[in-house]
Image (cartoon, helix red, strand yellow):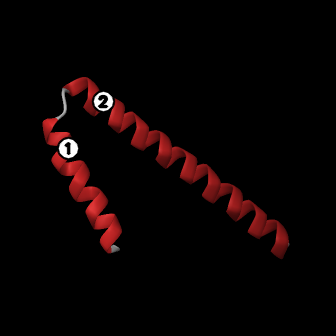
Amino acid sequence: MSEKQKRILEVFKEVAAKLPEEKKNYLLGYGEGMAAVVGREEDRKGEVETARTA
């Protein structure tokens, strides 16, 4: 894990402890949404790579 990744997690850990529950839910939803987008992009990238080698 890079230093930047560690810092991001550290900041979110500190902030999350201070947030009200509704803001925590928003932040969680945002993170899950980003994870879904990244997953779709990786899937598409894999499909393109597979098509190139076929």
Residue at the image point whose x is 43% and y is 41% from the top: 32
Q: Quadrant of residue 52?
A: bottom right
Q: Tell which of 38 and 27 is nearer to you.
A: 27
Residue at the image point whose x is 20% and y is 41% from the top: 16
Give the labeled residue for mark 1: 15
Q: How many marks?
A: 2
| Dot in front, 1 or 2 | 1
Q: Tag 2's secondary structure?
A: helix
Q: Tell which of 10 and 41 is nearer to you.
A: 10
Q: Tell which of 32 and 16 is nearer to you.
A: 16
- Measuring from the top left, give residue 38's x and y in whole percent: 55, 53
Is 5 positioned to the left or the right of 33 in the image? left
Q: Quadrant of residue 30?
A: top left
Q: Residues within 10 Å of mark 1 (few under 14, many from 20)?
A: few
Give the labeled residue for mark 2: 25
Q: In the image, what residue type sits under mark 2?
A: Asn
- Measuring from the top left, give residue 41's x and y in whole percent: 63, 54
Q: Is residue 45 above or below residue 53?
A: above
**Which quadrant would the C terminus be assigned to in this image?**
bottom right
Q: Tag 1's secondary structure?
A: helix
Q: Is residue 19 above or below residue 10?
A: above
Marks 1 and 2, how far apart at CA: 13 Å
Residue at the image point whose x is 18% and y is 27% from the top: 20
- Measuring from the top left, give residue 15's x and y in whole percent: 20, 44
